[in-house]
Protein backbone atom coordinates (compact mmCIF):
# COMPACT_ATOMS: atom_id res chain seq x y z
CA UNK A 1 0.00 0.00 0.00
CA UNK A 2 1.30 3.43 -0.94
CA UNK A 3 1.34 6.41 1.38
CA UNK A 4 -0.05 9.77 0.33
CA UNK A 5 0.69 12.86 2.41
CA UNK A 6 -1.99 15.55 2.49
CA UNK A 7 0.17 18.67 2.88
CA UNK A 8 -2.41 21.43 2.73
CA UNK A 9 -3.68 23.64 5.53
CA UNK A 10 -5.33 21.65 8.32
CA UNK A 11 -8.68 23.41 7.87
CA UNK A 12 -8.92 22.07 4.30
CA UNK A 13 -8.59 18.41 5.29
CA UNK A 14 -12.27 17.85 6.19
CA UNK A 15 -13.45 18.83 2.71
CA UNK A 16 -10.76 16.75 0.96
CA UNK A 17 -10.83 13.64 3.17
CA UNK A 18 -13.78 11.81 1.63
CA UNK A 19 -13.32 12.96 -2.01
CA UNK A 20 -9.64 12.01 -2.02
CA UNK A 21 -10.26 8.58 -0.52
CA UNK A 22 -13.11 7.98 -2.98
CA UNK A 23 -11.10 9.13 -6.00
CA UNK A 24 -8.15 6.88 -5.11
CA UNK A 25 -10.46 3.90 -4.67
CA UNK A 26 -12.19 4.63 -7.98
CA UNK A 27 -8.79 4.79 -9.68
CA UNK A 28 -7.89 1.39 -8.24
CA UNK A 29 -5.13 2.77 -6.05
CA UNK A 30 -4.64 1.16 -2.65
CA UNK A 31 -3.40 4.05 -0.55
CA UNK A 32 -3.19 5.30 3.00
CA UNK A 33 -3.68 9.05 3.30
CA UNK A 34 -1.70 10.56 6.15
CA UNK A 35 -1.40 14.05 7.61
CA UNK A 36 1.81 15.92 8.47
CA UNK A 37 3.47 14.64 11.66
CA UNK A 38 1.56 11.35 11.37
CA UNK A 39 4.21 9.52 9.37
CA UNK A 40 7.94 9.66 8.75
CA UNK A 41 8.81 11.75 5.64
CA UNK A 42 10.89 8.90 4.19
CA UNK A 43 7.78 6.68 4.15
CA UNK A 44 5.77 8.99 1.86
CA UNK A 45 5.23 8.02 -1.79
CA UNK A 46 3.27 11.10 -2.98
CA UNK A 47 2.75 14.59 -1.61
CA UNK A 48 -0.57 16.34 -2.21
CA UNK A 49 0.68 19.87 -1.81
CA UNK A 50 -0.47 23.42 -1.21
CA UNK A 51 1.95 26.36 -0.99
CA UNK A 52 0.06 27.45 2.13
CA UNK A 53 0.58 24.06 3.78
CA UNK A 54 3.22 22.95 6.30
CA UNK A 55 5.71 21.34 3.90
CA UNK A 56 8.33 23.73 2.56
CA UNK A 57 11.44 21.52 2.78
CA UNK A 58 11.22 18.49 0.50
CA UNK A 59 14.64 17.12 1.40
CA UNK A 60 13.38 14.50 3.93
CA UNK A 61 10.92 13.01 1.41
CA UNK A 62 13.49 10.71 -0.15
CA UNK A 63 10.91 8.15 -1.33
CA UNK A 64 8.38 10.59 -2.81
CA UNK A 65 7.74 9.99 -6.50
CA UNK A 66 5.86 13.25 -7.22
CA UNK A 67 4.53 16.44 -5.68
CA UNK A 68 0.94 17.05 -6.80
CA UNK A 69 0.00 20.70 -6.46
CA UNK A 70 -3.58 21.59 -5.54
CA UNK A 71 -3.23 25.04 -7.12
CA UNK A 72 -3.14 25.91 -10.80
CA UNK A 73 -0.22 28.27 -10.14
CA UNK A 74 3.16 26.86 -9.14
CA UNK A 75 5.16 30.07 -8.80
CA UNK A 76 5.42 29.69 -5.01
CA UNK A 77 7.03 26.27 -5.23
CA UNK A 78 8.73 25.88 -8.60
CA UNK A 79 11.85 27.72 -7.43
CA UNK A 80 12.18 25.75 -4.18
CA UNK A 81 15.78 24.46 -4.17
CA UNK A 82 14.84 21.43 -2.04
CA UNK A 83 12.27 20.22 -4.56
CA UNK A 84 13.86 17.47 -6.63
CA UNK A 85 10.74 15.38 -7.19
CA UNK A 86 8.54 15.82 -10.30
CA UNK A 87 6.01 18.62 -9.77
CA UNK A 88 2.53 18.56 -11.32
CA UNK A 89 0.23 21.58 -11.45
CA UNK A 90 -3.53 21.36 -11.01
CA UNK A 91 -5.62 21.36 -14.15
CA UNK A 92 -9.08 20.76 -12.78
CA UNK A 93 -12.40 20.82 -14.61
CA UNK A 94 -14.09 22.53 -11.66
CA UNK A 95 -11.40 25.19 -11.48
CA UNK A 96 -11.55 25.67 -15.25
CA UNK A 97 -15.32 26.07 -15.33
CA UNK A 98 -15.16 28.56 -12.47
CA UNK A 99 -12.63 30.66 -14.37
CA UNK A 100 -14.67 30.49 -17.59
CA UNK A 101 -17.78 31.69 -15.76
CA UNK A 102 -15.91 34.53 -14.01
CA UNK A 103 -14.26 35.78 -17.21
CA UNK A 104 -17.37 35.40 -19.36
CA UNK A 105 -19.50 37.20 -16.78
CA UNK A 106 -17.19 40.19 -16.52
CA UNK A 107 -16.61 40.42 -20.28
CA UNK A 108 -20.39 40.53 -20.77
CA UNK A 109 -20.66 43.11 -17.97
CA UNK A 110 -18.25 45.41 -19.81
CA UNK A 111 -19.66 44.61 -23.25
CA UNK A 112 -23.22 45.46 -22.23
CA UNK A 113 -22.28 48.47 -20.09
CA UNK A 114 -24.04 46.98 -17.07
CA UNK A 115 -22.25 49.14 -14.51
CA UNK A 116 -23.73 52.33 -15.97
CA UNK A 117 -27.13 50.72 -16.49
CA UNK A 118 -27.39 49.41 -12.95
CA UNK A 119 -26.23 52.74 -11.51
CA UNK A 120 -29.02 54.60 -13.31
CA UNK A 121 -31.49 55.52 -10.58
CA UNK A 122 -32.42 59.11 -11.48
CA UNK A 123 -35.62 58.40 -13.40
CA UNK A 124 -34.23 59.58 -16.76
CA UNK A 125 -34.98 57.35 -19.76
CA UNK A 126 -31.71 57.35 -21.76
CA UNK A 127 -32.67 55.35 -24.82
CA UNK A 128 -30.81 57.84 -27.02
CA UNK A 129 -27.50 56.74 -25.47
CA UNK A 130 -27.55 53.86 -27.94
CA UNK A 131 -27.12 50.12 -27.61
CA UNK A 132 -23.91 48.12 -27.34
CA UNK A 133 -22.48 46.56 -30.49
CA UNK A 134 -23.08 42.91 -31.16
CA UNK A 135 -20.47 40.59 -29.69
CA UNK A 136 -19.00 39.95 -33.14
CA UNK A 137 -18.05 43.62 -33.29
CA UNK A 138 -16.40 43.65 -29.84
CA UNK A 139 -12.69 42.81 -29.79
CA UNK A 140 -11.53 40.77 -26.81
CA UNK A 141 -7.89 39.83 -26.24
CA UNK A 142 -6.80 36.93 -24.04
CA UNK A 143 -3.25 37.10 -22.69
CA UNK A 144 -2.29 33.51 -22.00
CA UNK A 145 -3.55 30.48 -23.92
CA UNK A 146 -2.88 27.69 -21.46
CA UNK A 147 -5.70 25.43 -20.31
CA UNK A 148 -7.60 28.24 -18.58
CA UNK A 149 -6.94 30.92 -21.19
CA UNK A 150 -7.87 28.63 -24.06
CA UNK A 151 -11.11 27.57 -22.36
CA UNK A 152 -12.10 31.20 -21.69
CA UNK A 153 -11.20 32.24 -25.24
CA UNK A 154 -13.32 29.45 -26.72
CA UNK A 155 -16.26 30.31 -24.47
CA UNK A 156 -16.16 33.95 -25.56
CA UNK A 157 -15.75 32.96 -29.20
CA UNK A 158 -18.80 30.71 -28.82
CA UNK A 159 -20.79 33.80 -27.81
CA UNK A 160 -19.69 35.51 -31.00
CA UNK A 161 -16.91 37.78 -29.69
CA UNK A 162 -13.98 38.63 -31.93
CA UNK A 163 -11.29 36.92 -29.82
CA UNK A 164 -7.53 37.21 -30.22
CA UNK A 165 -5.18 35.27 -27.98
CA UNK A 166 -1.52 35.91 -27.21
CA UNK A 167 0.96 33.49 -25.68
CA UNK A 168 4.73 33.30 -25.34
CA UNK A 169 4.89 30.21 -27.57
CA UNK A 170 2.87 29.61 -30.77
CA UNK A 171 -0.60 28.12 -30.33
CA UNK A 172 -3.40 27.06 -32.66
CA UNK A 173 -6.99 27.15 -31.37
CA UNK A 174 -10.00 26.83 -33.64
CA UNK A 175 -11.92 30.09 -33.93
CA UNK A 176 -9.23 32.14 -32.14
CA UNK A 177 -6.67 34.42 -33.78
CA UNK A 178 -3.47 33.29 -32.06
CA UNK A 179 -0.44 35.55 -31.81
CA UNK A 180 2.92 35.21 -30.08
CA UNK A 181 6.18 37.06 -29.60
CA UNK A 182 6.87 40.75 -29.01
CA UNK A 183 5.34 41.89 -32.30
CA UNK A 184 2.28 39.73 -31.68
CA UNK A 185 1.83 41.27 -28.23
CA UNK A 186 1.86 44.79 -29.64
CA UNK A 187 -0.64 43.78 -32.33
CA UNK A 188 -2.95 42.13 -29.81
CA UNK A 189 -2.90 45.02 -27.36
CA UNK A 190 -3.50 47.61 -30.05
CA UNK A 191 -7.06 46.43 -30.65
CA UNK A 192 -8.03 45.05 -27.23
CA UNK A 193 -11.28 46.74 -26.26
CA UNK A 194 -11.54 44.21 -23.42
CA UNK A 195 -8.29 42.66 -22.21
CA UNK A 196 -8.21 39.50 -20.08
CA UNK A 197 -4.95 38.41 -18.46
CA UNK A 198 -4.41 34.74 -17.64
CA UNK A 199 -0.65 34.46 -17.98
CA UNK A 200 1.48 32.54 -15.46
CA UNK A 201 3.78 34.34 -13.05
CA UNK A 202 7.30 34.15 -14.50
CA UNK A 203 10.19 36.61 -14.76
CA UNK A 204 9.17 37.23 -18.38
CA UNK A 205 5.57 38.14 -17.50
CA UNK A 206 6.26 40.31 -14.44
CA UNK A 207 4.92 43.85 -15.06
CA UNK A 208 3.96 42.90 -18.61
CA UNK A 209 1.16 45.45 -18.35
CA UNK A 210 3.15 48.61 -17.69
CA UNK A 211 3.05 52.24 -18.80
CA UNK A 212 4.32 51.39 -22.29
CA UNK A 213 2.04 48.42 -22.97
CA UNK A 214 -1.04 50.01 -21.40
CA UNK A 215 -0.55 52.93 -23.79
CA UNK A 216 -0.95 50.53 -26.72
CA UNK A 217 -4.55 49.69 -25.79
CA UNK A 218 -7.42 51.61 -27.37
CA UNK A 219 -8.39 54.55 -25.18
CA UNK A 220 -11.01 53.52 -22.63
CA UNK A 221 -10.22 49.80 -22.80
CA UNK A 222 -11.31 47.55 -19.95
CA UNK A 223 -8.99 45.12 -18.17
CA UNK A 224 -9.88 41.89 -16.35
CA UNK A 225 -7.07 40.22 -14.39
CA UNK A 226 -7.87 36.91 -12.71
CA UNK A 227 -4.38 35.59 -13.56
CA UNK A 228 -1.51 36.81 -11.41
CA UNK A 229 -1.07 40.08 -9.53
CA UNK A 230 2.52 40.43 -10.68
CA UNK A 231 1.44 40.83 -14.32
CA UNK A 232 0.41 44.45 -13.69
CA UNK A 233 2.52 47.44 -12.73
CA UNK A 234 0.08 48.84 -10.17
CA UNK A 235 1.34 52.43 -10.32
CA UNK A 236 1.16 52.41 -14.12
CA UNK A 237 -2.40 51.04 -14.10
CA UNK A 238 -3.58 53.64 -11.58
CA UNK A 239 -2.04 56.41 -13.70
CA UNK A 240 -3.68 55.02 -16.86
CA UNK A 241 -7.05 54.85 -15.08
CA UNK A 242 -6.71 58.43 -13.84
CA UNK A 243 -5.84 59.61 -17.35
CA UNK A 244 -8.79 57.77 -18.92
CA UNK A 245 -6.49 55.60 -21.05
CA UNK A 246 -8.00 52.61 -19.25
CA UNK A 247 -11.74 52.88 -18.69
CA UNK A 248 -12.07 50.30 -15.92
CA UNK A 249 -10.21 47.39 -14.36
CA UNK A 250 -11.61 44.32 -12.61
CA UNK A 251 -8.87 42.76 -10.50
CA UNK A 252 -9.05 39.43 -8.69
CA UNK A 253 -5.36 38.87 -7.87
CA UNK A 254 -2.77 41.12 -6.25
CA UNK A 255 0.87 41.24 -5.25
CA UNK A 256 -0.14 41.20 -1.59
CA UNK A 257 -3.20 39.24 -0.52
CA UNK A 258 -5.46 40.05 1.17
CA UNK A 259 -5.28 43.43 -0.53
CA UNK A 260 -4.35 45.94 2.23
CA UNK A 261 -7.26 48.19 3.30
CA UNK A 262 -5.32 51.34 2.42
CA UNK A 263 -4.47 50.23 -1.14
CA UNK A 264 -5.65 52.78 -3.75
CA UNK A 265 -7.50 50.10 -5.70
CA UNK A 266 -10.21 49.85 -3.02
CA UNK A 267 -11.38 53.45 -3.37
CA UNK A 268 -10.71 54.01 -7.06
CA UNK A 269 -14.00 54.64 -8.93
CA UNK A 270 -12.75 52.78 -12.01
CA UNK A 271 -11.59 49.63 -10.23
CA UNK A 272 -13.60 46.59 -9.17
CA UNK A 273 -11.83 44.42 -6.59
CA UNK A 274 -12.83 40.78 -6.15
CA UNK A 275 -11.11 38.73 -3.41
CA UNK A 276 -9.32 36.03 -5.42
CA UNK A 277 -12.53 34.16 -6.21
CA UNK A 278 -12.30 33.71 -9.98
CA UNK A 279 -11.25 30.08 -9.75
CA UNK A 280 -10.49 27.73 -6.91
CA UNK A 281 -9.81 24.02 -6.85
CA UNK A 282 -12.92 22.05 -5.92
CA UNK A 283 -12.17 19.09 -3.66
CA UNK A 284 -14.27 16.61 -5.67
CA UNK A 285 -12.71 17.35 -9.04
CA UNK A 286 -9.19 18.13 -7.79
CA UNK A 287 -9.13 14.78 -5.97
CA UNK A 288 -9.83 13.00 -9.25
CA UNK A 289 -6.85 14.71 -10.91
CA UNK A 290 -4.58 13.76 -7.99
CA UNK A 291 -5.79 10.15 -8.01
CA UNK A 292 -5.33 9.81 -11.77
CA UNK A 293 -1.76 11.05 -11.56
CA UNK A 294 -0.95 8.61 -8.77
CA UNK A 295 -2.50 5.80 -10.80
CA UNK A 296 -0.46 6.79 -13.84
CA UNK A 297 2.75 6.99 -11.86
CA UNK A 298 2.20 3.56 -10.29
CA UNK A 299 1.44 2.12 -13.75
CA UNK A 300 4.62 3.61 -15.23
CA UNK A 301 2.67 6.08 -17.39
CA UNK A 302 3.58 9.72 -17.96
CA UNK A 303 2.33 12.19 -15.35
CA UNK A 304 -0.29 14.73 -16.38
CA UNK A 305 0.43 18.48 -16.17
CA UNK A 306 4.11 18.04 -15.38
CA UNK A 307 5.76 21.40 -14.71
CA UNK A 308 8.66 22.51 -16.90
CA UNK A 309 11.06 23.90 -14.30
CA UNK A 310 12.96 26.00 -16.85
CA UNK A 311 9.80 27.77 -18.02
CA UNK A 312 8.31 28.00 -14.54
CA UNK A 313 4.93 26.40 -15.35
Image (cartoon, rainbow, N blue to C red):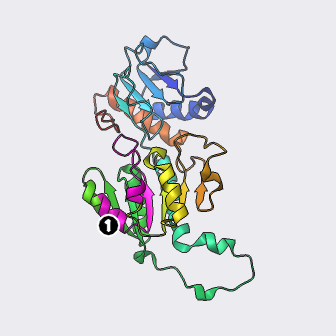
Residue 34 vs 185, above or below: the answer is above
For label 1, the SS is loop
Can residue 125 be seen?
yes
232 relative position to 171: left or right: right
Residue 284 locus on image (x, y percent): 53, 40
Asked if residue 30 lies in the magenta stretch, the reply is no
Q: Magenta region: which residues?
A: 185-214
Residue 76 vs 274, above or below: the answer is above
Q: Which residue is mark 1?
A: 175
Quadrant where the image shows the N terminus: top left
Residue 145 locus on image (x, y percent): 35, 53
Residue 235 locus on image (x, y percent): 50, 51
Can residue 28 be seen?
no
Asked if residue 209 lies in the magenta stretch, the reply is yes
Quadrant where the image shows the C terminus: top left
210 relative position to 188: left or right: right
Q: Nearest the camera: 160 or 125? A: 125
Residue located 42% across and 13% down the image: 60
Q: Residues within 10 Å of mark 1 (few under 14, many from 20)?
A: some
Q: Nearest the camera: 79 or 231? A: 231
Residue located 40% across and 76% down the image: 136
Residue 26 locus on image (x, y percent): 46, 35
Residue 232 vs 55, above or below: the answer is below
Amino acid sequence: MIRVLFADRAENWPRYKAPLAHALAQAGVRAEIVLPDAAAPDSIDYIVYSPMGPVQDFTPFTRAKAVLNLWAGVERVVGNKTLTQPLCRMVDDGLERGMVEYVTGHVLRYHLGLDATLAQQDGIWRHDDGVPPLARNRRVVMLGLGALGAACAQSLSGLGFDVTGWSRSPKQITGITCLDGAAGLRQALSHAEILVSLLPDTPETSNLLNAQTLALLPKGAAIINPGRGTLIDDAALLAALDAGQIGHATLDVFRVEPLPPAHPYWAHPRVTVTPHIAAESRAETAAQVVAENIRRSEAGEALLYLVDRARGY
